[in-house]
Amino acid sequence: MSHHLDSELARRDPRLDISDVYLFRGSTGTVFVMNVDPLSGRHGFHPEGMYEFKVDLDADAVEDITFRFVFDAIEAEDDADATADHDHPQRWSLRVLHGPEATDRDAAGVELLRGATDAVSVSADGGIRAWAGPAADPFWIEGTVVTAVRTALAEGKGLDLAGFDTDRAENPFQGTDVGAIVLEVADHVLAADTIGFWGVSVLATDAGGWRQINRCATPLINTLFELEDAERGIDFNATRPDEDRVLYGPRVMRDTSATRAAMAGTADASAHAERVRDLLFPDVLRYEIGTEASFTPERRNGRPFADCTPEAMFEIVLGTRVALGLDASSAGVPRADFPYVPLPTATRQS
């Protein structure tokens, strides 16, 4: 899994569970995608939550722009089983916040767009377009492999894939849907050469204010290193990227150093661990505006749908290639144009 079901709070309400984010060049600008509600995609979006696209313009891992989506309740909410679809859409609003307001969840910002799920909305000047609704999950992974990598890191041992047969590899997310929010922003709106991006979901609290439920940028960080640990008071999803190096760097270095030493000897284990820490933290997707996105061990520039990010992450963390035995054919096929995300499974099967 990437960030699917990676925290207790997110598991309580999958509408706030961010499974993945993506960042790439679209047909009119830079595309930001946030996927939530893994394994279903039919619960809609939380009407008491906010879905925020955080954009860093100066490489300090602090947002300079926030694009904030909020959703109304599903129109058929008297039905306990109601889902957001063509017959029961959710209306949404998109606001933008700049500078100090970008970090302030009580700031109002400026409304850019209004729309409804499963329908495209475009700003008056054409600089921004947005869409939200169900989509097939474009992520793929092999459960046996990710479990073996997690075990190696947790126990400081070498990678054991003796029982894994690539010919029998299966993607547990094949044929499943997510709830997707897609935002495409023209270059002149961002006015930057390079940006950083991460997504967060937050929920209103009974006491007033907001609680951050999930955050997501680089795939698999929380899964591989198990940074979410309630017993030890570690809440990765509640923290900020600019805190990552201090809060989680030592844990990542310890785990990668021990596993690297078990696999390749101690000669470069410490240096390898430092490289991994510096590559992964702060947990922000960096992207050069206008270029082709790539997420590979050699080049991390945004995150497109087509790259096998688990294999890239395994190689970055372990220092050796680990094959899944799968490719993009086991996941939903992205659309060629906006909103880019794959058609939902039910649509493709009808």
Image (cartoon, rainbow, N blue to C red):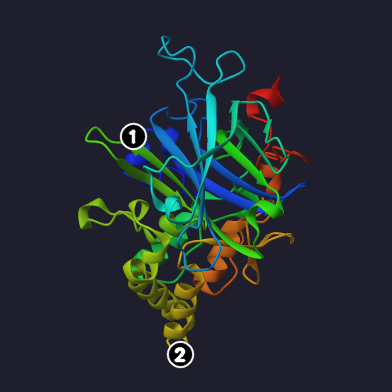
Picture quarter with the C terminus: top right
Relative vertical location of residue 37 with respect to residue 22 in this rendering, above or below: above
Which mark lies nearer to you, 2 or 1? 1
Badge 1 amino acid: Arg
Q: Position of residue 94 (x, y in %)?
A: 54, 36
Q: Residue at x 62, y 54 (%)?
A: 166
Viewer-closest of 235 and 263: 235
Between the C-alphas of marks 2 and 1, the distance is: 44 Å
Identify the residue position indicated by label 2 in the image.
267
Badge 2 amino acid: Ala
Q: Position of residue 78 (x, y in %)?
A: 41, 9
Does any portion of residue 16 appear in the rendered image?
yes
**Label number found at residue 164:** none
Viewer-closest of 80 and 6: 80
Identify the residue position indicated by label 1 in the image.
12
Which residue extends farthest bottom?
Answer: 267
Q: Residue at x 44, y 78 (%)?
A: 273
Which residue extends farthest top?
Answer: 78
- Is 245 on the left or on the right of 323, as rendered? left
